Image (spheres, grey):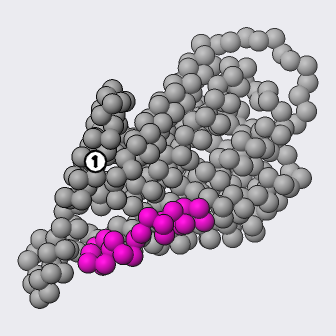
Amino acid sequence: MRPFGPSGPPAPLSVTLEALTQAVFIFGVGVTIIISNVLIIATFLNARGSRDVINIYLLSLAVADLLVGVLIVPLSVYPSVVQSWVYGDAVCRAVGYLEVTLWNISVFTFMWMAVDRYLAIRKPLRYETIQTRTRCQCWMVFTWISMSMLCCPPLLGFNPPIFDPDAYVCMLNWGDMWAYSATLAILVLGPSLMTIIYTYSYIFAMYKRLRSGVPIHDKEYATALAEALANPTHIMSFVLIIVFWLSWTPYIGVRLWEHFTATRLQVPFLHFGLVWLGVLNSFWKGIILLSLSPDFRLLVRFFCLTVCCRGNKARLQAELMGMDMDD
């Protein structure tokens, strides 16, 4: 990686097959991210009758991923062809700020999602009174505002942003702000990882307890707990979190190793592959929802029917509300 600096006269454009292949790949990633997340957002906005508050968290994730596909990924297509950043220092700095902000928003949203699933199991009889839509919406507004503010100092600093010539992305320069970087990591990753580990450990422990036949004397609680554990949303949300961290852990691990050893791994396509493996996480969420969430597949079906049968939108919405209340 190198700091972004004043550019000299443009070099003659010589497009190689390798550069063209990378550009096509990045363009394809951007298109798939946009299409999948537009579908997710449209589906949730169309399902006004659904009372499942976890959809608020999924909608927040989809909005963050859509911004990645619209504002970040397209700006890497042309630089991958010409092998340099061409949009100027201000745009490079703004892209780096958006990257770290949207990434932190996703991390915190997964934490709130884990808390939501924990409450559904820990307090099955009071879940709907504890996790109201208004409360969840407030948590999401708090997350977006707080993460936007926490990531501002490097954006407003004097250090030039960094352009990665291997992955063709811009990043903020945290070189002289390691104390702040460590504090931000503790504030974001610490609570998020500890919450996710604790909540899902409890959920899977309750799965094991229920399957082992351990008696629960409160029959009403036992019935509500069994119904809550039967909800596939727990597994779906857990897979979303695992895939997110599997996508980004290799890149984080390599960056930490390079920082502490003061060496850069000279492996062809390593940094390109690791960065875009992480970015692809913005696309996998749609596949996971379609694969593991019957409720989401139902909402997609109603969205498609609403688009195709505009005259029956009110009837379809009423049916959706009725099915949701039955569940």
Q: 127 or 265, which is in the foreground?
A: 127
Identify which residue, 136 or 246, lies in the foreground: 136
Query: Is residue 132 covered in magenta?
Result: yes
Residue 274 shows in this picture: no
Q: Could you tell me what secondary structure mostly forms the magenta stretch? A: helix
Whole-percent x, y for residue 193 in the image:
48, 67
Where is the N terminus found, in terms of image quarters? top right
Please tell me in which quadrant of the rendered image residue 220 appears: bottom left
Q: Is residue 268 magenta?
A: no
Residue 171 left/right relative to 293: right
- Please provide the residue range marked out in magenta: 120-142
Residue at the (68%, 19%) spot, across then down: 81
Callout 1: helix, strand or loop? Answer: helix
Q: Is residue 153 visible?
A: yes
Location of mark 1 (residue): 318
Relative to residue 54, is residue 281 depicted above or below? above
Considering every residue shown, the one lying at the far bottom of the view is 217
Quarter in which the C terminus is drawn: bottom left
Q: Is residue 317 left or right of residue 208?
A: right
- Sort mark 1 into few (<14), some (14-19) or many (20+) by Cα contacts within 10 Å: few
State the image quarter where residue 228 is shown.
bottom left
Residue type marked 1: Ala
Nearer to me, 164 or 257: 164
User: Which percent across, then down, holds residue 250?
Assistant: 51, 49
Q: Residue at x 71, y 42 (%)?
A: 95
